[in-house]
Image: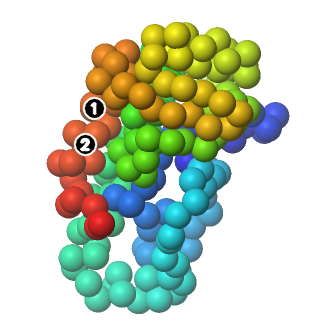
Amino acid sequence: MMTLMRNGTAIHTAMIGREGALGLNAAIGPRESMSRSVVQVSCEAWRISASILNEIYQHSAPLRAMIDRHNEALFGHAIQSVACNALHAVEARFCRWLLSCDDLIDDKTIHVTQEFLADMLGVQRTTVTAVARALWGRRLIRYSRGVIYLLDRPGLEALACECYDSVRQGYKRLLPAPLS
């Protein structure tokens, strides 16, 4: 999820993978999103109409509780991202983002352009290039046109900021294990 500015710039605010869902607030009633969501990796997804979701929501206490927990986890993720974007170095945020992708897709290969990464991190493309080269030099990743290969997860964890673990623990506490 990305927050868009009037001038067209955007910054990463949260990630949703198999542990969650996009648009769950539609269960409560009609909503207009305040963010832009971008699918980063190809995957299977399910879709349900807002009206059907709302109907089920009205009659299912377990669904209401799950949506409340999901919203709390997503809100915690978003506010942690605000702090992270303001306070942490690009390299630490880059590592956090790579680790989060690895958690959500279970694949050491991430297909992403430098331009997209620059948007996600709120930096210039040249900054992404410099950080990727530094991580490659430490043998933590390998990077080729549009593909990042994670080589050393513990090394990335050592460089990631505290936000990675904070968000991860919030999801673990609030949501059941993801479906396989």
Q: Is residue 2 visible?
A: no
Which of the pair 131/24 is nearer the observer? 131
Around disc 1, counting alpha carbons within 10 Å, would you say few (fewer than 14), some (14 to 19), or many (20 or more)? few
Q: In the picture provided, is 78 more to the left or to the right than 36?
A: left
Q: Residue furthest right?
A: 7
Q: What percent of the width, then of the height, locates residue 127? A: 67, 15
Q: Do the CB atoms of the residues marked 1 and 2 lie less than 8 Å apart? A: yes
Label 1 secondary element: helix
Q: Which residue is at a point 64% across and 12% down the rendered structure image?
A: 130
Please state the horizontal and vertical placement of residue 109, each as a whole percent of the image: 51, 42
61 to the left or right of 128: left
Which numbered disc covers residue 31?
none
Q: Quadrant of the C terminus?
A: bottom left
Find residue 150 and report its horizontal and vertical position in percent: 45, 32
Badge 2 amino acid: Gly
Relative vertical location of residue 28 with respect to residue 167 in this rendering, above or below: below
Q: Relative to 177, is 142 on the left or the right?
A: right
Q: Can you say whether 80 is above or below 16 in the image?
A: above
Residue 101 appears left or right of 11: left
Residue in view at x 50 percent, y 71 percent: 45
Q: Which residue is mark 1?
A: 166
Residue placed under numbered mark 2 in the picture: 170
Identity of the residue drawn at 60% across and 44% down: 111
